[in-house]
Amino acid sequence: MGLMDAMVRAGASALGSKVNERKASLGTFSKARLVPVGSKSGAAPFEFMFNPDNIQMRKLVQVIESPEQGQDQGRIQFKSGKAWDLTLPELIFDTYESKEDVRKVYIAKLEEFVYVDAEAHAMPRLLFEWGEFRPDFELVATALDVRYEMFLANGTPVRAKVKLTLKSYETEKKRQDASQDNALHSPDHARIYTV
C-alpha cells in the first residue's frame, strides 16, 4: 500500500508540474489586434487576449448547375466568388477585478466596428493580427454576438463572451487590379490570327 501511495503522489506531482508549465506558457501568447485601416479619425488598434482552440475561415463560391439530359449531374459553371468569412469564437472580456463595466471598457470599442463610419459613409475596414496569423486581406465586421455572464450586485456586467464574424473586403482599386490580372480567356470563342 505504501508503494502505491508513493506512485500516486509521484504521478500527481508530475501532472501538477505539467499544468504549471502549461499555465506559464499561456502567459506568453501574443495579444490579438483589430487594426482600423484608412480611418481619418486615427482610431487606435483594439488589443485583446486571445487563445483560441480554433479560428474558422470560410469562402463560398457561387455556381450555376445546368441540367443535362441523361446525366447523373448537371454541368457546374462558376458564377462568382464570395467574400471570406473569418469567425473568432468566444473572446472573453473580464473586468471583475477592477469592478468596471465590461461594456464601457471593451464592448463599446468592438461595437464601433459594426456601425457605419459617419465620416467615410462606410463600414470601418480592419486588419486582424495575432502573432504570425495575419490574413492578407482587409475585413469588415458583419456580426457581433455578446453574452454577459457575470454581474456585480448592482447589475453592472463584468464578464462578457463575444463571437465576432468578419468578412473580407476589397477596395475598388484592388478589385480593378484583380480583374486585370485575372482576365478570363474563354476557350469556346473563335479567334483570328493574322499570319
Image (cartoon, rainbow, N blue to C red):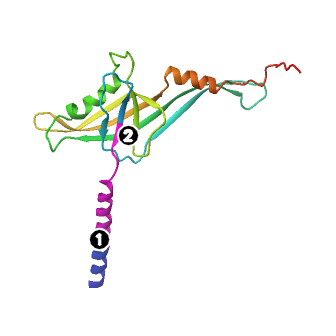
Which image quadrant for residue 102? top left
Image position of 114 with respect to 92: above or below: above
Q: Tell me if label 1 and label 2 are in contact, CB under 8 Å.
A: no
Classify mark 2: residues with Cα within 10 Å, few (<14), some (14-19) or many (20+). Answer: some
Residue assigned mark 1? 12
Our reading of the magenta stretch's main secondary structure is helix
Classify mark 1: residues with Cα within 10 Å, few (<14), some (14-19) or many (20+). Answer: few
On the rendered structure, is 70 left or right of 150? right
Residue assigned mark 2? 89
Q: Nearer the viewer, residue 19 or 134?
A: 134
Which image quadrant for residue 158? top left
Give the percent coordinates (x, y) of residue 7: 31, 79
Q: Is 131 included in the stretch rendered in magenta?
A: no
Judging from the image, what secondary structure is the residue with disc 1 in? Answer: helix
Q: Residue at x 30, y 76 (%)?
A: 10
Which amino acid, by three-letter code, is at mark 2? Pro
Q: Residue at x 14, y 42 (%)?
A: 98
Q: Is 26 included in the stretch rendered in magenta?
A: yes
